[in-house]
Image (cartoon, helix red, strand yellow):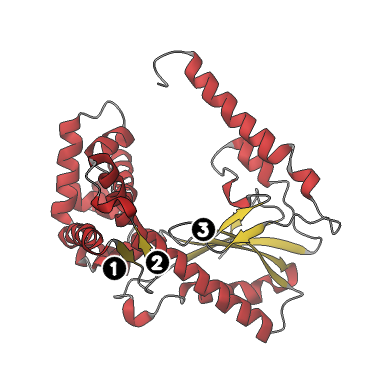
Amino acid sequence: LRDEHPIIPEILRYRELAKLLGTYIDNLPGMVGKDERLHTTFLQAGSVTGRMATQNPGLQNIPIRTEEGAKIRRAFVAERGYRLVAIDYSQIELRVAAILSGDPKMIEIFKNGEDVHSAVASRVFGVPEDKVDREMRRRAKVINFGILYGMGVNALRQNLGETTPRAEAQEFLTAYFHTFTTLAQYLEDTKASARKLGYTETHFGRRRYFEGIRSSIPFVRAAAERMALNAPIQGTAADIIRIAMVRVDEYLREAKLEKDVCMILQVHDELIFEVKQSRIKEVVPKLKAIMEEAFPEKDARGVPLLAEVKAGPNWGSLEPIT
């Protein structure tokens, strides 16, 4: 309804600001402990896909793309003499999709270290990669992430922009699946398996069951099928970061680094640490390597897991470091 009446954008903006004010700005100062720290509670089974969740307060949901969200994040500061270090898996769900599906073209893109969105645009639009423009890359990015969530032609059209004709969105979707045929077959096989068994599994064997997968009500069944497509991919990514967290903890204990390095937050595909400034050059490459090696190499089909590192004095002012 956003474009139906001038008041609608204003209501949405009001809701956005009211959420930030009520959930974070007014609430967080009163939750600070005697140690002047804010302590969240992690829920191991906080999400049906296997992702961890946080509550009281929910620190994983502070928006990152808005200026207001960035301002709130800047209130989270490192201790004197320390820096906050964020290590984030790069496009982990797309990499997991390539591994699980075994699609040779998608695997090739990651093995070659190509920009995945430009590379996909090149293959789908049939142009050399150096001729891929910003709009082509944007469209490829929309569909790359959309197919992981079972996005159909109507959702694709909406995400590409309302001016995109439905026929054009369908043509794009068809071209994508004609290019990445093994991935397309994997998604169909996943749906069929979920209908037959009632569940899907991550690479590591963790199951998620779907009550509506055999429903006679079309929209209930379609929603269950979309969730079934995403569950093995997002679930495997969630398993990977949990494995990484365990290994990081073992490393910090064995190296007796608990006073100098503290793992303080997990935000889905990202781990955030507080690291003594004098130890950053020594410790961060090791933490990054542990995260990148969390998936068994023998099962990775040559697809590397890559992590990106940022550091700074506060959570809202992190800058990339090499």
Residue type indicated by callout 2: Thr
Gap between marks 2 and 1 measured at Cα: 9 Å
Separation (CA) of disc 1 from disc 3: 20 Å
Kindly state the secondary structure of the residue where label 3 is placed: loop
Residue sitting at x 43%, y 59%: 49
Disc with the residue nearer the chain's start (1 vs 3): 1
Residue 67 at x, y percent in the picture: 60, 36
Classify mark 1: residues with Cα within 10 Å, few (<14), some (14-19) or many (20+): some
Residue 28 visible in the snapshot: yes
The residue shown at (35%, 72%) is: 203
Instruction: Indicate the secondary structure of the residue bearing disc 2.
Output: helix
**x%, y% of residue 9?**
49, 21
Mark 1: amino acid: Leu
Which residue in the structure is indicated by mark 2? 236
Q: Which mark is residue 268?
A: 3
Neighbours of disc 2 within 10 Å: few (<14), some (14-19), many (20+):
many
The quadrant where residue 305 appears: bottom left
Q: Mark 1 sits on what residue? A: 100
Would you place residue 18 above or below residue 143 in this image? above
Figure check: 158 above or below 128: above
Can you say which quadrant of the picture contains the N terminus? Answer: top left
